[in-house]
Amino acid sequence: MSTIGENIRMYREQRNMSQQELAMKVRVGVATIQKYESGEQVPDTPTILKLCTALDVPASELLERADLSNSSSIDPEIEYLIKDIGIKRAKLILRKAKEFSEEDFCASCKCYMN
């Protein structure tokens, strides 16, 4: 799977854009783009938004693939669910699941089993 840097490179190359052109559009140095693409540095949120604008790609596409970069350690059913409902909803579900006590879980199971 890919990292955000690999995604930046992939979308840049798909658009036949040089690192220098992208750097100018995002208003960073060429060395910074090189560091992003090599994985040495990760762009901050405002820069990610600028990259998305310059590359004409939604942030969800630029980031979603990167967020699943460790998919080999993710259960295939969970990975499918994340792809199906999206990373934002999956994070919300995970956060809510962490708040769920064992008693809440047992009570919920009883409701659905009856």
Image (tube, helix red, strand yellow):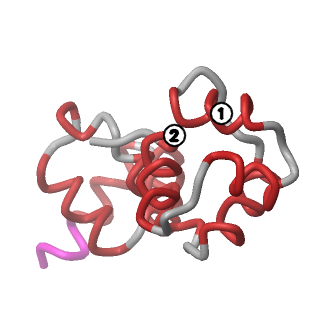
Magenta range is 110-114
Residue visible at 34% across and 42% down in the picture: 2
Q: Identify which residue is drawn at 63% across, 46% down.
A: 19
Instruction: Quickly name the residue at label 2.
Output: 5
Magenta stretch, overall SS: helix
Looking at numbered disc 1 in the image, what kind of residue is underneath it?
Val
Q: Is residue 110 above or below residue 70?
A: below
Q: Relative to residue 96, is residue 9 depicted above or below?
A: above
On the image, the x and y values in percent for residue 13 come to 45, 57
Of the image marks 2 and 1, the number of the one nearer the N terminus: 2
Q: Indicate the secondary structure of the residue bearing disc 1.
A: loop
Spatial CA distance of label 2 from label 1 is 8 Å
Q: Position of residue 113 (x, y in %)?
A: 12, 73
Q: Which of the 4 quarters of the picture holds residue 33?
A: top right
Nearest the viewer among 18 and 63 is 18
- Element type at mark 2: helix
Q: Quadrant of the C terminus?
A: bottom left
* Numbered tag placed on residue 113 in the rendering: none
**Residue at image x 24%, y 40%?**
71
- Which disc is residue 42 wearing? 1
